Image (cartoon, coloured by chain):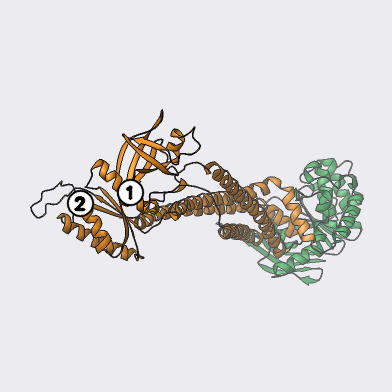
Amino acid sequence: MIRLEKINKTYFGAQPLHVLKGIDLHVAEGEMVSIMGASGSGKSTMLNILGILDNYDSGNYYLNGKLVKDLSENEAADVRNRTIGFIFQSFNLIPFKTAMENVALPLYYQNVSRKKRNQIAMEYLERFGLKEWADHYPNELSGGQKQRVSMARALVTKPKVILADEPTGALDSKTSAEVMQILREVNQTGITMVIVTHERGIALRTNKIIHLKDGVIENIETNNPDQIDFSKEIK
Amino acid sequence: MDFWREIFMALSRNKLRTFLTGFAISWGIFILIVLLAAGNGLMNGVSEEFSDQSTNVYMIYGGETSIPFKGHGTNRSIRFTDKDIRFLETEVKEVDQVSPRIYQNGFANFGDKSGSIFVQGVRPVFKDINNVKMLKGRFISELDEKSSEKFIVIDDNLSKKLFENEASPLGQFVIVNGIAYKVVGVCESEGRSDGGNGYVPFSTMKKITRQSRYWMLHFTVKGLETKEDNEMFTEYLRTQLARFHEFDPDDTSAVYIRSRQEEYLQTMKIFNTIQLFIWIIGFAMLISGIVGVSNIMRITVKERTNEIGIRKALGAKSRSILASIVTESLIITTIFGYIGMWLGMVVAEVSGNILSKVQEGKEISLNIVPSIDIRIVLMATGLLIVCGVLAGFFPARNAVKIKPIEAMNYR
């Protein structure tokens, strides 16, 4: 599903910063992968490149079998809209839209009719137990609820890949566990999932942990979440 | 349809922002229109003031010499005589009719009533020269002048004072400085003076006061159309008078020659300057309105950078984001621009109506009734709308250009 070949990325500022130094990575369809690393290791940059939110300098990135390189803005927007779902640490909900309108927004850019997209959005909200909160604005929701809304929004277009950037970073441990549980369930429906985190407890719930250090992959740890007793795991 | 709903939602969910942007636009247009209306009112007042006066009138006044000439010293008073009148009437082809103007201050009495009066001895043509408006009876006639009748025309102020108990002042006799005059007409009061005005035939007053040197001569002219005609005629008149009265033709203080056309042109020049000044202020207001709108739009787009980033991450194309922001600014500027325009026009109209009611029937030297030119109003509003849209377009274009991840993390 995702294949990275010798990806390089440098930020040209006052002090040029070589963030990714020839990353090679393969994530198969339906895999659930986490990327770990200290801040500055390049993990967020990598996720942004995967999400076509940022470009890379050299190498090749194949998504769903297609090369993602030098896409025009419109092509990138289309790929993002149809193939990728995003979950952010700070939720990134639009403050003046209700939960339902936020979830329905990606469908607006697919030209789905208003009635249809609200109906689909409601289905997803219901699935995440937020039916009663559909008409509430983000500032009326708790952190966990907001993240569930943003998960519903990520899934509403039936994407192939979910990219999550520190999805539990702003949540307490109980809510974090709930969110991770939902993400696992989503993964089990066949959607590929890449989660960036710096918390080991989160990474341990994925099947593959990619350790990133100073712009290179240090090692890849295989993991079986089913063998871990999470009731003892301390966040 | 969906596009419009999306825009309407963005506007209605951000009421304060929408209102502030709109207010800047409404205010700019409002002030501009009110200012221009006031300026137009002033201009209309001035033109009206001149429109009921004939401009083909000359007034010459005797002064004092300031340059020695042909053995005469300075400070010699120049006064006009019957010879000058005859010369003007017979020798100068441009002159139509002449009326000297001599006067006397005093009291007018009727029975036990009295009032102060300023009596002027004039010829019939003076009615046209000074735009005397008759209310009752008639003005001095040629016959009155020829036979030196003791007839008088008094103004409304004095008429009310003296004849408040009479059915009509016409035919009554008033005593002015010991001489009885028969009232033949009542004219409109002129200006703000409390005292009365009266007109008697020139020949009558000349006999009574034994004046033969006159300070003022008024006359109407014909065939002087342009400024150049008037300048040449004035020059000719000055040299002729200089010859008769033996003063230096370059001595400008010996006689003063005024034409009403010249006065009119001078006054118009002053008011054109005022008008220009009002335009400059109005234009400055418009510019400050535009700057205000641009600023608010810039801040609005900056505030929305996060939202733009999120929308792009969710698959929005730059074009659709740009289109919605520009449409939003178009809607705000159009709606609020028109609100400002209508408010401005209503204020201008209402104040115009009130002012013309207040001024009606009152003796006011200048009628100032605000009025507006709808074309200018539409043009100004259109300009502000275009600028408002551009003010939304450029920052929005910059905002959609930045990478979505940077836009999302923008603080």
Residue bearing the label numbered 2 = B254
Q: Position of residue A201 (x, y in %)?
A: 82, 46
Callout 1 secondary element: strand
From the viewer's perspective, tell me whether residue B352 is left or right of residue B112: right
Disc 1 marks a residue whose amino acid type is Val
Callout 2 secondary element: loop
Disc 2 marks a residue whose amino acid type is Ala
Q: Is residue B188 above or below residue B248?
A: above
Q: Hey, which quadrant is residue B96 in on the image?
A: bottom left
Q: Colour of chain A?
A: green
From the viewer's perspective, tell me whether residue B23 is left or right of residue B108: right
Q: Position of residue B283 (x, y in %)?
A: 50, 54
Q: Residue at x 84, y 48 (%)?
A: A148
From the viewer's perspective, tell me whether residue B257 is left or right of residue A137: left
Residue bearing the label numbered 1 = B122
Q: How many other residues sit within 10 Å of disc 1, few (<14), some (14-19) or many (≥20)?
A: many
Q: How many other residues sit within 10 Å of disc 2, few (<14), some (14-19) or many (≥20)?
A: many
- Separation of residues labelled 1 and 2 (CA atoms): 23 Å
Q: Is residue A215 visible?
A: no
Q: Nearer the viewer, residue B118 or A233?
A: B118
Pinpoint the chain carrying mark 2: B
Q: Earlier in the sequence, mark 1 or mark 2?
A: 1
Same subunit, tags 1 and 2: yes
Q: Nearer the viewer, residue B321 or B189?
A: B189
Looking at the figure, which quarter contains the N terminus of chain A? bottom right
Q: Colour of chain B?
A: orange
